Amino acid sequence: MKFDSKEVLSIEDLGEVDGSPVKAVSLVGGLVIGVKASGKSSQVIGSASHIGLLRHAIRKTVSGFRPSLMKSDSDEKEVVDYSSLLPGVLLKSNYGLYAISESPSQIKYTLTHQSDTQDHTSEFHMKGLIKNETLFLTKSGENHPLISQISIALGKAAAKDAVRHGKKFVEFNGTRFDSKKLAK
């Protein structure tokens, strides 16, 4: 696979599959592509907007994938798959909902959509900031056209994370919810 050098931000070791190295190629615009090198050829085995999502997707879909050791535990971000919380129609349409722990106090929620007809992933993000007893949800960028369909799943995902982090509440748009009740 060939990329114009102007399009590539970085190339990192991601791991290996069947003894062949897998690289994460970060491109201008935010896409990260997982490329398996095999002799003189290469094969794209995944793509995402974040290296943590890419590693998670490859772990789930590519048998024999062995991630490389990270420089430190903090280099590998925890990814939680909350796709099962989405309405069935979105799951059938290749949508996914993920939470990426950016730091001990910050979580990024990402709605992904892998198109059957195009080789790209579209995404929508929300941030979760953990402060005192509350996980605060804030919007990043424009509203997603499916926000009404994903809001329940997003609220449940945030509530599960709040409970997991020992927080009592989830707050969005000034409304506070009991995290244990919402997580059910």
Image: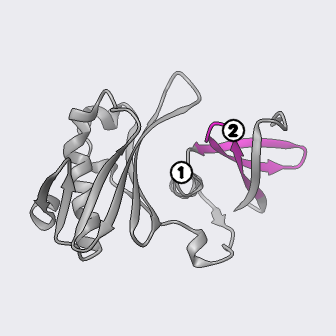
* Residue assigned mark 1: 61
Looking at the picture, does residue 124 appear above or below residue 77? above
In the image, what residue occupies the spot 48% across and 28% down? 115
- Residue 141, how many percent across, how many down? 41, 37
* Type of the residue with mark 2: Val
Name the side, left or right, on which 31 lies relative to 163: right
* Residue assigned mark 2: 28
Report the residue that reaches farthest toward the right: 40
Looking at the picture, does residue 18 appear above or below residue 98? below
* Residues in magenta, as a range: 21-47
Verify whether residue 70 appears in magenta.
Answer: no
The quarter of the rendered structure image containing the C terminus is bottom left
In the image, what residue occupies the spot 23% across and 47% down? 153
- Residue 74, how many percent across, how many down? 56, 74
Residue in front for this viewpoint, 148 or 142:
142
Q: Secondary structure at mark 1?
A: helix
